Image (cartoon, rainbow, N blue to C red):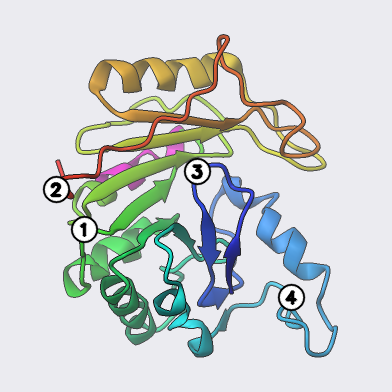
Amino acid sequence: MADGTAIEWTEATWNPVTGCSKVSPGCAHCYAETFAERWRGIPGHPYEQGFDLKLWPSRLDQPLRWTRPRMIFVNSMSDLFHEDIPVEFIASVFDVMARADHHTFQVLTKRHKRLAELACDLRWPDNVWMGASIENRRFVDRADALRGVPAAVRFISAEPLLGRLEGLDLTGIDWLIAGGESGPGHRRVKPEWIRELRDRCQSEGVAFFFKQWGGVRSKTGGRVLDGRTWDEMPATAAGVAR
């Protein structure tokens, strides 16, 4: 599935895989799981299987049919480096991204170990950005794995941010997205956690994007931090990793 999206830091989503499984605290209130499970058991619906992992080979060529260049978040409803996705299918996704070079693709994972294992065997064209989700200090080592990936842009998604990211090394990181959690039972983000990341990004030359404060609904708390919105994007004109 590929379509427009309300996600502030991208323009469209493309889901050659749907479904996932939980690996860390940031997954506890997964918006994708909540959405997919609404449709479980409805014959013919794309989420008839709920949030069970499913490959969609028929969707692989979809970006090639999009003529207007756009920024595309890959697998907004899954994790491309999930342990049950065959290496061959991951390689096929990367092949499509390389061929669809009029688009920019944003890939995001919590499975940093598998990313590190496979990175050398994948194609990394300049239009593929690679990110890691880091929700608290226990998982700052995901950035270490990300640094070894030969992507033109490397980014961190600190969303939902569940604590201070002490020990996070921003060396080689081009972009950081931060945000609070949304939905029923959301865990509140503290302003000082966001400000600390913002200040570090400013001092270390990393583009900073503040997505949301969070709340019962994603838009409830707004996006203003210290009197303004923060919508910085990484410089990509040269297409060269730092």
The secondary structure that dominates the magenta segment is helix
- Say the numbered circle drawn on residue 9: 3
Q: Amino acid at mark 2?
A: Val
Q: Are marks 1 and 3 in contact (CB under 8 Å)?
A: no
Apparent side of residue 125 relative to residue 70 in the rendered image (left or right): left
**Mark 1, secondary structure of its residue:** loop
Ranked by sequence position, the earlier of labels 4 and 3 is 3
Residue holding disc 1: 126
Q: Position of residue 55 (x, y in %)?
A: 53, 84
- Say the numbered circle drawn on residue 240: 2
Q: Residue at x 46, y 70 (%)?
A: 82
**Mark 4, secondary structure of its residue:** loop
Q: Position of residue 127 (x, y in %)?
A: 27, 59
Assess whether residue 150 is covered by the magenta stretch.
no
**Mark 3, secondary structure of its residue:** loop
Q: Quadrant of residue 225?
A: top right
Q: Are marks 2 and 4 in contact (CB under 8 Å)?
A: no
Spatial distance from mark 2 to mark 3, Cα to Cα? Answer: 20 Å
Q: Are marks 2 and 1 in contact (CB under 8 Å)?
A: yes
Q: Are marks 4 and 1 in contact (CB under 8 Å)?
A: no
Q: Amino acid at mark 4?
A: Gly
In the displayed structure, 196 sits above or below 103; it is above
Assess whether residue 142 is covered by the magenta stretch.
yes
- Say the numbered circle drawn on residue 50: 4
Q: Position of residue 21 (x, y in %)?
A: 59, 66
The magenta stretch is 137-144
Spatial distance from mark 4 to mark 3, Cα to Cα? Answer: 26 Å
Q: Quadrant of residue 76?
A: bottom right
